[in-house]
Image (cartoon, grey):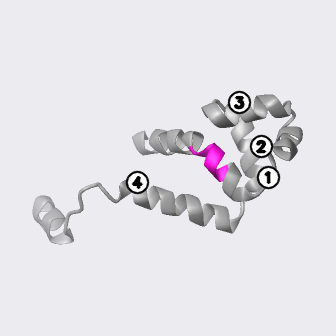
Amino acid sequence: MFNIVENYMELKKNMGTLINKSGYKNAFLAEQIGIPAPTFSVKKQRGSWTEAEMKKILDIIQNEKLEDFFFLELMRAESNEPRYPVSDLKKEMGW
């Protein structure tokens, strides 16, 4: 469950980057989700999206290239976490 919350927080923090990478204009996305363009720009800078706004934006901008970018960012974020060989895990489990 903690991992889900971390992923959500990471997504919310990186929405501005995802929007930039998508190639869509702020004004277009603002219109599509029903908020004024200046409000959209402020939310993009602050990362203050609601869950509903995030879903609407992702429904518009989601594509394979963007998914690849986000997956790469997640992999980079996890690259500093310690890695353990399978043999160590087997020892702990008594296999």
Left or right? Give the position of 80 relative to 70.
left
Q: Residue at x 10, y 65 (%)?
A: 91
SS category of the residue bearing label 2: helix
Q: CA distance from mark 1 to mark 2?
A: 7 Å
Q: Which amino acid, mark 3?
A: Val
Q: Give the residue pinned by disc 4.
A: 77
Kind of residue indicated by mark 4: Ala
Q: Position of residue 7 (x, y in %)?
A: 49, 45
Main SS, magenta region, reads helix
Looking at marks 4 and 3 on the same chain, the residue that comes earlier in the sequence is marked by: 3
Residue position for label 2: 56
Could you give the CA–CA distance between mark 1 and mark 3, rounded to whole angstroms?
A: 19 Å
Query: Which amino acid does the dot numbered 2 rest on?
Result: Lys
First in residue order: circle 1 vs circle 3? 3
Q: Label 3, on which residue?
A: 42
- Residue denoted by label 1: 60
